[in-house]
Image: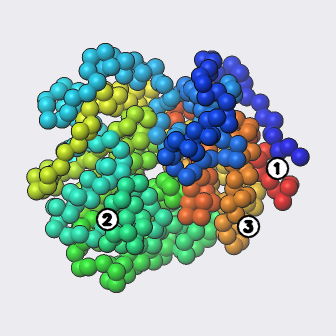
């Protein structure tokens, strides 16, 4: 029996139409053969029936057959202001006609004007910027700078964290890979402690216990890591303000503030990985760390910085930056004039379009409405996040909080896609649906998604 769902959307809300797709790889089977034989892609291909994306505009994508999708994953939280946003596209075209590439060994206006503009969005003393091509590069560079500055080597991260796909950054997650240590992720839904007022989110967990005790216990776990697994002096502590790949996991209020104190007592520096949470995505603040009332020693960023164009950055203090002269390091494409022009136009667009404010208002509306579905369905265990960094953790039942099996997650994901919406997955067990869309989505888009998701969950529970 077909599981295709029927949910309509007002056509008047989408005025853009895709160009016809007509190249030699129009045959789906041929594209999949090329992917298998000639493309060294990731092992992951979403969906049993993959989506063959052809074109995008703002929050919309079209496949090669002309089918339209509401994109609520944004190429993994990367398209910040919208696919092919007219302002960013125009800035890109202007720069393409002027200068594509020169390296940062030369003085060119785009690099220096952009660094000055980006620095204005960060609090003192975070004012020294090094541009890269990706978040993985930015995090690798941050690790190098932390070790040079402190003279220490070990780095601590959270379990379930993700900081990149290079050999060094993979070591931040895969602890057997490099001498890095992991501490318990202070997850107030799935972890051993958590309460109904723990996190800075419009929606709290369904658990009932002492929030003060939860934070205390998670900090004790970090202290235990220092006492038993790490040397007396460390290089750095890496933390995402809200975990991305980990499934939009949020920590108890004040956790990062107390954790930063402990790290600095051991001689380490504190690094905020803003690759997914930066540039207004959390709504209440431009940077995720600001929601924790902390100032890190270093900030790494990528993804939304360039709205999909490959750009990354490390921002640090003058004191730490001085230590970088000890290393011999060069990046051919970091600070590329085209990348700087794109990234600069993204900052302008966020301000001019009130993108951060939209993320706050639309994201809060989405989460509060999703909480109603959580209360309706036993398989939706938790709804969490801030702004448009949202996770929906799926469970077999709320009592056990046991993760919904992968085959069930895939079944629901497929149904949502077939009805015209793209969302992501994450979590240690792949049990969390992720909503991290272009930050231009509307309340009407949210209502459409809610109808689609409600139908998908209802269909799953009926079949179950």
Q: Is residue 445 above or below residue 128?
A: above
The reply to whether residue 444 is in sight is no
Determine which quarter of the picture holds residue 148.
Answer: bottom left
Residue wearing tag 2? 237
Residue located farthest toward the front when viewing the structure as drawn: 37
Nearest to N terminus: mark 2 or mark 3: 2
Left or right of 5 on screen, residue 136: left
Q: Position of residue 79 (x, y in %)?
A: 48, 36
Q: Residue at x 78, y 35 (%)?
A: 7
Dot 3 falls on a residue whose secondary structure is loop
Nearest to N terminus: mark 3 or mark 1: 3
Dot 2 falls on a residue whose secondary structure is strand
Q: Is residue 147 above or below residue 310?
A: below
Q: Position of residue 223 (x, y in %)?
A: 35, 78
The image's mark for residue 459 is 1
Nearest to N terminus: mark 2 or mark 1: 2
Dot 1 falls on a residue whose secondary structure is helix
Q: Residue at x 63, y 60 (%)?
A: 431
Residue wearing tag 3? 397
Real-space Cα distance between discs 2 and 3? 35 Å
């Amino acid at each position: 029996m077909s599981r295709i769902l029927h949910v309509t959307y007002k056509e008047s809300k989408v005025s853009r139409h895709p160009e016809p797709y007509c190249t030699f790889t129009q045959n789906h089977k041929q594209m999949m053969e090329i992917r298998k034989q000639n493309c060294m892609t990731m092992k992951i291909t979403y969906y049993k029936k993959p989506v063959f994306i052809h074109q995008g505009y703002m929050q919309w994508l079209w496949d090669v057959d002309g089918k339209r999708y509401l994109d609520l994953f944004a190429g993994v939280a990367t398209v910040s202001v919208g696919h092919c946003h007219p302002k960013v596209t125009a800035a890109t075209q202007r720069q393409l006609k002027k200068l594509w590439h020169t390296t940062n060994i030369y003085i060119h206006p785009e690099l220096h004007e952009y660094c000055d503009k980006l620095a204005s969005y960060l609090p003192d003393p975070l004012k020294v910027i090094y541009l890269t091509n990706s978040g993985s590069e930015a995090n690798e560079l941050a690790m190098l700078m932390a070790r040079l500055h402190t003279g220490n080597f070990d780095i601590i991260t959270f379990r379930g964290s993700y900081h990149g796909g290079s050999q060094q950054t993979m070591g931040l997650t895969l602890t057997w890979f490099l001498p890095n240590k992991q501490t318990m992720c202070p997850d107030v839904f799935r972890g051993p402690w958590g309460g109904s007022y723990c996190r800075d989110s419009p929606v709290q967990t369904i658990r009932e216990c002492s929030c003060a005790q939860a934070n205390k216990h998670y900090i004790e776990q970090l202290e235990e890591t220092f006492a038993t697994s790490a040397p007396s002096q460390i290089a750095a502590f890496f933390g995402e303000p809200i975990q991305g790949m980990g499934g939009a996991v949020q920590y108890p209020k004040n956790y990062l503030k107390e954790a930063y104190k402990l790290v600095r007592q051991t001689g380490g520096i504190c690094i905020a990985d803003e690759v997914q949470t930066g540039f207004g995505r959390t709504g209440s603040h431009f940077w995720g760390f600001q929601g924790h009332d902390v100032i890190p020693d270093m900030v790494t960023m990528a993804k939304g910085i360039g709205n999909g164009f490959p750009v990354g950055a490390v921002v640090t203090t003058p004191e730490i930056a001085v230590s970088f002269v000890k290393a011999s390091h060069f990046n051919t494409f970091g600070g590329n004039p085209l990348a700087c022009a794109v990234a600069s136009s993204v900052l302008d667009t966020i301000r001019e379009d009130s993108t951060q404010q939209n993320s706050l208002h639309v994201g809060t509306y989405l989460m509060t409405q999703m909480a109603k579905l959580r209360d309706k369905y036993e398989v939706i265990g938790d709804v969490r996040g801030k702004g448009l960094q949202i996770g929906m953790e799926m469970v077999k039942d709320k009592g056990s909080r046991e993760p919904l099996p992968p085959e069930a997650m895939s079944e629901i994901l497929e149904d949502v896609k077939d009805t015209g919406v793209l969302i992501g997955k994450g979590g240690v067990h792949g049990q969390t649906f992720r909503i991290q869309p272009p930050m231009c989505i509307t309340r009407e888009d949210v209502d459409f998604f809610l109808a689609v998701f409600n139908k998908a969950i209802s269909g799953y529970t009926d079949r179950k």
